[in-house]
Amino acid sequence: MSRRRSPASYDESDVRVRPGRGSRPRSKIRPAHRNAVPGTVVAVDRGRYTCVTQDDERTVIAMTARELGRKAVVVGDRVGLVGDVSGRDDTLARIVRVHARTTTLRRSADDEDPVERVIVANAEQLMIVTSVTDPEPRPRLIDRCLVAAYDSGMTPFLCVTKSDLEDPAKLRDAYAPLDVPIIVTGWDDDTGLDRLREALHDRTSVLVGHSGVGKSTLVNTIVPGAGRAIGNVNIVTGRGRHTSTSAVALRVPEGGWVIDTPGIRSFGLAHVDPAELIEAFSDLAAATDECPRGCTHGESEPECALDDAVRAGGLDPARVDSFRRLLASRERQSGD
């Protein structure tokens, strides 16, 4: 029979401290995953990533590994895959590595939002889709997309749709001074579609544009069987209804990839340095060579050469106004 000890007789040696789960030492050595299978993310849906392997083009569903932490993975990312990469139904692999991106298409919700949202990675071309009518073209949105393309290192071109409904000459003339290829398409114009297929051949291209301009229709034409939903334009607001809800990469039969993105109504550029905006307006940039040192090319600049060029008839006032409106909103953001 054991004798009960007096509390006064206890000392440190009688106390057993069990370390908490979070205090257990963890090895800093992480698996190298040298045998990871290279792949490309082609779709993202609620934490599940559809990937295509580079060797035999298996389609693999994966989740991100814990060691990636909160690192964002987007369509176009080149990744390393481990685990069950067989591609069979009800299997799940892990993304353990995201390779450095060659290009990154980013936008913010608006010019006052400092949070960048990566839309697509590793695309070579930005195809800006706009319609001649139904809905009406939005030049300032087009300009913002051009700025984003130049900032990301992508090559932009403009695709004008619905030329069978209205003459696209006015829109084409507005962007003729820019060094940006323009492809015009319509239901009765096979030549435009042939030029578009040629531009997309063996390239990775991302399509952007506001809702209702015909992005999904183009994708369904270029990639038969793509099955992208098509919506109508609201007759009251003149705006399209969102039909694509997430970005998805689709293989072009003739070679290459197209990435369809949801329709956008705004394209914030909070991540772009205002001093670099002029480079996206090549028709205006040449005129600024005559500006005095330190000129920001804004509306309040008293000796800006852009004003002289407008008065001389060498520049379109609407183009200068578009640039300055964009510049003013970016300057307000940088000064906050």
Image (cartoon, rainbow, N blue to C red):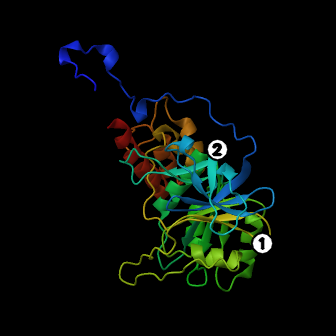
Is the residue 106 above or below the residue 15 in the image? below
Residue toward you, 164 or 116: 116
Is the residue 38 above or below the residue 223 in the image? above
Amino acid residing under circle 1? Pro
x and y percentages locating residue 334 in the rendered image: 38, 38
Q: Nearer the viewer, mark 2 or mark 1?
A: 2
Extreme residue toward the front, this view? 1
Residue found at x 40% / y 51%: 325
Residue named by callout 1? 253
Side (left or right) of 17 relative to 285: left
Confirm whether residue 293 shows in the render. Answer: yes
Q: Quadrant of the N terminus?
A: top left
Side (left or right) of 324 relative to 162: left
Q: Earlier in the sequence, mark 2 or mark 1?
A: 2
Residue named by callout 2? 97
Residue found at x 55% / y 65%: 261
Is the residue 107 above or below the residue 173 in the image? above
Q: Quadrant of residue 208?
A: bottom right
x and y percentages locating residue 211 in the rendered image: 48, 72
Residue found at x 49% / y 29%: 293
Residue toward you, 54 or 258: 54
Side (left or right) of 140 relative to 227: left
Side (left or right) of 295 relative to 27: left
Amino acid residing under circle 2? Arg
User: Is the residue marked by circle 1 packed among few (<14), some (14-19), or many (20+) residues within 10 Å?
Assistant: few
